[in-house]
Amino acid sequence: MTALPRRHAITVMTGIGAIVAGLPAQAVAKPAAPKRPAMITARDGTRLYFRDWGEGRPVVFLAGWGLPSECWAYQAAELSEQGLRCIAYDRRGHGRSDAPWKGYDYDSLADDLAAVLEQLDLRDVVLVAHSMAGGEVVRYFSRHGGARVSKVLLLAPLDPCPAHKADNPTGLPPEMFEAFRTHVLMRDYPRWLEENARPFVTPQTSAEMMDWIRGLMLETPIKALVECNRAATTADLRPEIPNVKVPMLVIQGDKDASTPLETSGKRYAALAPNAQLIVYEGAPHGLMFTHIERLNADILAFAKGA
């Protein structure tokens, strides 16, 4: 998927009160500290849902096109037990975040990322971005400088210049992307998901896992899908990639049917000044679902490295 590419107790208050009244003062539990709200407010007022697990160096996960933060479930659950603070948020229009009518361009999405980092006061951050989210990270560095970020991991990034241009002969004609939005997304997105689910994963991926992934993506409004696809396929991020001067790790499979390794992962690795590329043999686009153990180990090593 181009950039295919969501889970009574009845209390008798008088009895509780009598029990508490009979306890010594030191035995009465203190009220729990108030929890942080699970919403970030973006610059335009859009509310962005996030989850925040663990302690240690903050790792912020950005999901790919059409996917909510829940797609990182297998990374956050394990890595939060390995000394990392795992924060994943829903892009606007995805998951439990607000779905406004506008604001799906890369500038707005990069500003949303800035709002997450600033309102949680995160520093020394490792960003982990899948597919089109790589563009959000690049644009964040262009617009905000990236002072809060120490490392970037791009997972199966989308081609930074998907459309055909005179200096980009491998790109696809822009009218093909517009036809996809008009005749597929706006007509029968569920069918397209069904037809493209298998290439997104591996032959060993269970039918149940595929159903779960499709379910996550079917929750995303068509408006958000169309506008995010437009933002990703009309962008030319090649001049901006050198702005990401922090260490960058690019991970991609050589069987990625959504975005070819030659024009995506390898292109990012060549344009970023401090990048390393790791190729997973036989791996598809949905690496967070198909290569959980290996990917988690690579994220952990990268995040905890100097």
Image: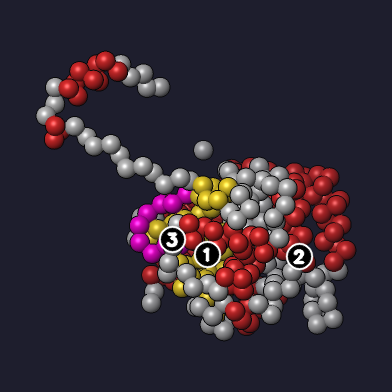
* Residue 172 screen position, x and y as percent: 82, 69
Q: Residue furthest left?
A: 24
Q: Which comes before the other along the chain, label 3 or label 2?
A: 3
Is 57 in the magenta? Answer: yes
Highlighted magenta segment, given as a residue range? 51-59
Where on the picture, by quarter, is residue 59?
bottom left
Is 58 in the magenta? Answer: yes
Name the amino acid type tagged 1.
Val
Q: CA distance from mark 2 to mark 1?
A: 21 Å
- The N terminus is located in which quarter? bottom right
| x 67%, y 52%: residue | 66
Q: Cβ–Cβ below 8 Å for labels 3 and 2?
A: no
Mark 2 = which residue?
A: 233
Mark 1 = which residue?
A: 128
Closer to us: 245 or 206: 245
Mark nearer the viewer, 3 or 2: 3
* Residue 158 screen position, x and y as percent: 68, 67
Closer to us: 59 or 32: 32
Mark 3 = which residue?
A: 121
